[in-house]
Image (spheres, rainbow, N blue to C red):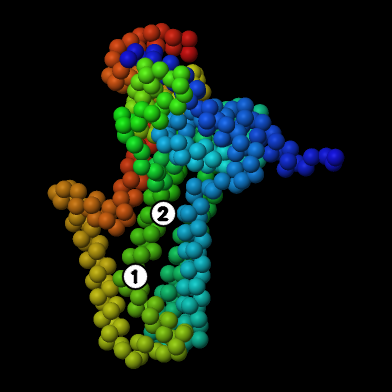
Amino acid sequence: MGAKTPSLQRRQAFCALIEQHRRIVLKITHTYCRNQADREDLGQEIIGQLWRAFPSYDPARSFSTWMYRIALNVAISRMRYQVRRPTVPLGDAPHELADGADDALEHDQRVLALYRFIDALDEMNRALLLLYLEDHSNSDIADILGITATNVSTKLNRLKNRMKGAFGDDTDRLETSDGNR
Amino acid sequence: MATDDIKLAWQELDRRMERQEALLLRQLRDERLTRARHSLWPLVFGQVVQILVGIVVIVLGVAAWQPHSDVPHVLIAGIVVHAYGVIVTMLAGIMLGRMFRIDYAAPVVVIQRQLASLRLFYIRCGMAVGLPWWVLWVPFAMVSFAVLLGVDLYARIPLAANLGILLGFVGLLGTWLFRRWAHHPARGGLGERLDDAAAGGSLRKARRIVDEMKSFERDE
């Protein structure tokens, strides 16, 4: 067996990194698409863009930050500029959400409510919410989105107020748990 | 529903992603995945076509004015068509350059602002390329007849050609005046509706996104 070519090595390194961080792609597709086919298309487009940008990736920098930036840019652009498949209103499609036998109705309702909340947000606030729910620090979020940490903090407070408005009470517990950010 | 539940629901999504996860991993091992279509390809394709059209127009213009430099009206028509071809080619080149400079690994706000201003530029270029045809059809017809058929159209029907140019300028001026009138605040958004009709709503959408990005950035 001969030595691996640089392009094969690059591809293998890329695939290994993507496998390791694949949840980023999946979470982003679930944040921006309600339709399974759209999610698959978006996932494919994100991977394609990551691959094209991979030669310019600087290994000294965080791979996940690089990946979040590209994946969010692709998802937001797709939302804004491309025609998407028509979506079924969420209230009419509970069965799509319950794809496992272990999914209790209560869980479906919870996910359904989350989807409704996400769907009411604009593209940039969806990105903010996703990064917040993935427990990124304010400075990480600022780095990915390209705004100041102060701005992130202000926007997150507004987002939490919207959550309060949408779901009722009890953001206090959430804010307490955010104290260490 | 407590807001803590949002985080729980978010974690529950992990369990729902298994199907897509398996597909993604399968696709990752598939050679075709890394060749996924770039979302800007339709725009790139459009600009390449515009450059080709621009080159054809330049060739047509040069082919008219060079051998007929002693016939003033053909010379002028040729130069006008030549200049139009250069502008069309240049605008498409600038657009392509801006598209290829977009680095998706830059912060989200930076790229989204660049993309929105690119769309705005694209729509305005479309208008800049389309509006001159109010007048341009006359020199274009003169040049086409001279180059392709060897006929001096202006010499044969000078009145019709002059009238066409005059009406073209009146139409261009009228379009500009009407646009100004329609965009006056007192017209209740008539101008925006006209822009929507002309650009399929994309101009307003691009402007809205540019404004949104500015507000997202500075909103502290």
Q: Do marks 1 and 2 share a chain?
A: yes
What residue sits 43% from the left and 20% below the top?
A103
In the displayed structure image, the side of residue B71 where residue A19 appears, left or right:
right
Q: Examine the rendering and report whether any part of residue B33 can be seen.
A: yes
A22 above or below B45?
above
Q: Give B139 or A110, whichever is nearer the viewer.
A: A110
A55 above or below B217?
below
Q: Which residue is mark 2?
A: B122
Residue at disc 1, secondary structure: helix
In the picture, residue B116 is in which quadrant?
A: top left
Say whether disc 1 or disc 2 marks the residue closer to the N-terminus.
Answer: 2
What residue sits 79% from the left and 40% below the top?
A4
Chain under numbered label 2: B
B132 above or below A153?
below
Q: Residue extending furthest front?
A: A101
Tell me residue B147's x, y (percent): 47, 84
Residue type at the position of mark 2 = Tyr
Q: Give A1 or B111, whichever is nearer the viewer.
A: A1
Q: Examine the rendering and report whether any part of residue A53 can be seen.
A: no
In the displayed structure image, the side of residue B124 where residue B110 appears, left or right:
right
Give the numbered dot on residue B42: none
Chain under numbered label 1: B
Residue type at the position of mark 1 = Trp
Tell me residue B213's x, y (percent): 38, 37
In the picture, residue B112 is in which quadrant?
A: top left
What residue sits 49% from the left and 49% below the top?
B40
In the displayed structure image, the side of residue A36 where residue B182 appears, left or right:
left
Q: Which residue is mark 1?
A: B133
Gap between marks 1 and 2 measured at Cα? 18 Å
What residue sits 50% from the left and 22% below the top?
B15
